[in-house]
Amino acid sequence: MPRKIQRRLTPLELEIMKVLWETGPASVTTVQERLARSHELAYTTVQTMLNILWKKGKLTRTLVERAYHYRPKVSRQTAVGQALRDLVQRAFGGSAEELVMTLVETKQLTPEALERLRKLVKETKDA
């Protein structure tokens, strides 16, 4: 039976997407070199990960001479939104309020960020 392709991005897939959002279309070699700053990955590993992302529909690829060049098919905003919705669902039972409260309680928001959040809430309330 064929394996089901999971649509959610893994941490490594997200790192690869970040490289492509920053560089634009890139070959396996370019992605591998950019990832080398934080990961030591073999060329074949990066190639496999790019093919998985292509199969998930997250990338397009174009054959340039003898190498594929990969390009993001989804925007950073869309991918981050999906990842955040998934996190909220899995870790906070679907409650975005619980996520925000946890960020506040664990002091992961600066006073400036809290002030911006307060203003945003007020603007949304007044709209």
Image: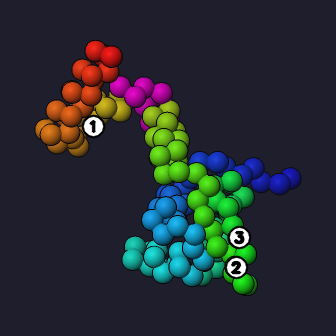
Residue at screen point 52% across, 61% down: 17
Residue 95: within the magenta?
yes
Q: Position of residue 40 (x, y in %)?
A: 47, 79
Please say if the residues under marks 1 and 3 sit with CB atoms less than 8 Å apart: no
Q: Amino acid at mark 3?
A: Thr
User: For mark 2, what is the residue?
Assistant: 64
Q: Secondary structure at mark 1?
A: helix
Callout 3 environment at 10 Å: few (<14), some (14 to 19), or many (20+)?
few
The residue positioned farthest toward the right in the image shown: 1
Q: Is residue 68 above or below residue 95?
A: below
Q: Is residue 47 above or below residue 112?
A: below
Q: Quadrant of the C terminus?
A: top left
Instruction: State the separation of the CA atoms marked 2 and 3.
Output: 6 Å
Please say if the residues under marks 2 and 3 sit with CB atoms less than 8 Å apart: yes
Instruction: State the separation of the CA atoms marked 1 and 2.
Output: 45 Å
Q: Is residue 51 above or below residue 36?
A: above
Residue at screen point 21% across, 27% down: 119
User: For mark 1, what is the residue?
Assistant: 103
Q: Which one is in front in this view, the residue at disc 1 or the one at disc 3?
A: 3
Mark found first going from the N terminus, 1 or 2: 2
Give the label on residue 34, or none.
Answer: none
Q: Which one is in front in this view, the residue at disc 1 or the one at disc 2?
A: 2
User: For mark 3, what is the residue?
Assistant: 62
Where, by quadrant of the figure, is residue 126 drawn? top left
Q: Position of residue 77 (x, y in %)?
A: 47, 46
Q: Amino acid at mark 2?
A: Val
Q: Amino acid at mark 1?
A: Leu
Which stretch appears magenta?
90-97
Q: Does residue 45 appear in the picture of this structure?
A: no
Q: Secondary structure at mark 3?
A: strand
Q: Position of residue 118 (x, y in %)?
A: 21, 27
